Amino acid sequence: MALFSRDPATRAIKRLVEGMPQRSTINLTPGNVVFGLVLGSNNESTTVVDLESQAIVRWRIPWPFEYETDLAVFDVVEGQLATDLERNDLAQPEAVTLSDLPRRLGTYRGRRVRKWLEQAASPPDGPLFGFRGPSAPYWEFRGERPSVALVAADRGPQLLRRIEDGSTWVRFGWFGDDVWLLCEDAHAVRTIEATRRPSLAGKELATALGFRPTYVLTTLSRPIDGHCYKSCTGLLPRG
């Protein structure tokens, strides 16, 4: 609490988040100004908690060509919905398009965030995204299942670096499944690259990341050669 009283910027973010008008559903009026708490971001989409409804949303952001996203976990961001929300993607039913780049306002964490993450954690209702394996044909999606799953791993997670192609992978256990996902979390990728280790897990991973990873944010990609692929777009602390 003392931190909030000393830092005006932190106090301002706290007032913004905790004073946000609450809605039972997401306001998807084209052109509407929206506020989100970032859970994970890559150049395809940014996953946020909508601060008015606490629902999980994926923002399609028109990043400039060859510009890498600079949004980090628990950033508070402000954006404007596009005139055409492009809500016709059956593989990503919670995705909407922004008209321009979002504005980063600060960061926010604490008990409210812990509660939101606990509420958003995916239930054990079968394999991740409803299918086994790394991908599924796009034509099999009907818009009935979310393309985001916040997983509370019951084993791991572990970061692994493949020497042959330089890719980073996340391995974790979830209700009996041994899950391997390509890692697209820039902080996690930089972390294992900096250590020059082939793998990180447990206390070593927590020390390298700067926090104990409690959740694995997983998402489905847009179609690539007709298939949508699972990936990890964020390793998150408890809150």
Image (cartoon, helix red, strand yellow):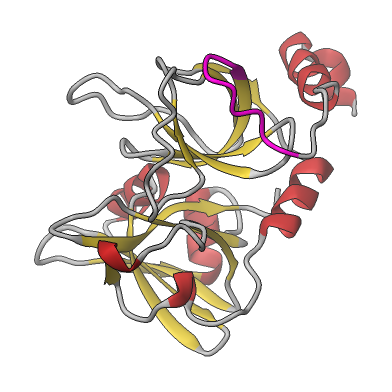
Q: Which residues are magenta?
A: 25-33
- Up/down of 111 relative to 230, above or below: above
Look at the image and say whether residue 29 sits in the magenta stretch.
Answer: yes
Residue 52 horizontal/vertical position (percent)? 74, 30
Residue 49 location, quadrant:
top right
Residue 52 in the figure: left or right of residue 136:
right
Q: Residue furthest bottom?
A: 176
Residue 86 in the figure: left or right of residue 68:
right
Look at the image and say whether residue 36 sits in the magenta stretch.
Answer: no
Image quadrant holding the N terminus, namely top right
Give the residue displayed 28% in from the left and 51% down from the top: 193
Magenta-highlighted stretch: main secondary structure?
Answer: loop
Residue 57 in the figure: left or right of residue 140:
right
Residue 233 horizontal/vertical position (percent)? 42, 51
Residue 107 horizontal/vertical position (percent)? 64, 27
Residue 223 location, quadrant:
bottom left
Residue 86 location, quadrant:
top left
Residue 112 in the figure: left or right of residue 234:
right
Instruction: Report the front residue among 177 and 169.
Output: 177
Residue 197 seen in this snapshot: no
Instruction: Report the front residue among 220 and 73.
Output: 220
Residue 45 horizontal/vertical position (percent)? 39, 38
Q: Residue furthest left?
A: 164
- Up/down of 210 relative to 155, above or below: above
Residue 223 seen in this snapshot: yes
Give the residue displayed 37% in from the left and 81% down from the top: 132
